[in-house]
Image (cartoon, helix red, strand yellow):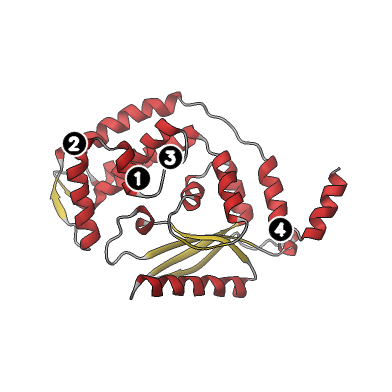
Amino acid sequence: MERIDIEAQIRNKLSEIEYTENVRVIMAVESGSRAWGFASPDSDYDVRFIYVRQPEDYIRLHPLRDVIEWQLDDVYDISGWDLQKALRLTYESNPSIHEWCGSPIVYMENELAEPLRQLAAECFITKKSLYHYLNMAHHNYKAYLTGEEVRLKKYFYALRPVLAAGWVAHNETAPPMLFRELIDAELPADLMPSVEELVRVKTETSELGLGPKIPEIDRYIREQMEQLQTAADKAENLRNDWTGLEKFFRRAVLPDSLMSAASVNAG
């Protein structure tokens, strides 16, 4: 099925979610290997969205779930977070929020999407992001890359977070989703041929099987994990402020008439 047909189906499914769940989708994006730029031919579509419910749903005695899990099969993986949950996680500088806000593939968004992206950028915490990507790299390296023979595609699961951590250390902003942007910014030139060959094989075939370690990539991952751990330990652990998040939540949930009344009362 052609990509444009898939994207049309995804938008239809999102509209169905809005109608069935009585919610508004603020943004819906691709969050997996397709957004990273190295999807295999048979990769599924990892659709993630942030939605807002009706005002009365936020004052219920028995609150509704703050997650909508819509579909999980061989083609689609579609789920979303309530705005209240998303903003609480934005306060914590949750890496998933930053990745969703930075996804290069957007299936749906409304007028609140861009202000939400700006708010997430303002809430970014360097130390937390560094620890997140380093923990991911350490876990994946230990789980998949310590044997004499390794599943070659697993190099991406350690290399991408290492490059992302390098970006965070050098720029103190959320890293780009596209793997191409990360390797252009962070990967040493002498490693480009080896990594680009891995990307080529992964994007052209679903079979990237067992093989011997790639010494130069393996060494780079281990050295970077050690160096970036030092940078993470030294980074400041700044805290965020709730003011902008609270204001945005009220703007998203309350009708204009109630927002005006709230502003008068606050004055």
Q: Which residue is mark 3?
A: 132
First along the sequence among labels 1 and 2: 1
Secondary element at tag 3: helix
Q: Looking at the rendering, in which quadrant would you find the N terminus?
A: bottom left
Q: Position of residue 200 (x, y in %)?
A: 21, 55
Sequence-earlier tag: 3 or 2: 3
> Relative to 202, is 137 on the left or the right?
right
Q: Amino acid at mark 3?
A: His
State the residue position of label 4: 253
Mark nearer the N terminus (4 vs 1): 1
Residue 26 in view of the camera: yes
| 235 relative to 209, above or below | above
Q: Quadrant of residue 186?
A: top left
Q: Are marks 3 and 2 in contact (CB under 8 Å)?
A: no
Q: Neighbour class for label 3 at 10 Å: few (<14), some, many (≥20)?
A: some
Residue 215 in the image: x percent, y percent? 15, 38
- Label 4 environment density (alpha carbons within 10 Å; few <14, some 14–19, many ≥20): some
* Residue pointed to by mark 1: 181
First in sequence: mark 3 or mark 4? 3
92 relative to 202, above or below: above
Density class for disc 2 (Cα within 10 Å; few <14, some 14-19, many ≥20) is: few
* Among the two numbered marks 4 and 2 on one chain, the one whose residue lies closer to the N terminus: 2
Q: Amino acid at mark 4?
A: Val
Quadrant in which the C terminus is drawn: top right
Camera-nearest residue between 135 and 244: 244
| Distance between the alpha carbons at the discs numbered 3 and 4 | 31 Å
Q: Position of residue 21 (x, y in %)?
A: 61, 71
When the figure is inspected, residue 142 is found, relative to residue 198, above or below; the finding is above
* Residue bearing the label numbered 2: 190
Sequence-wise, which precedes: disc 1 or disc 3?
3
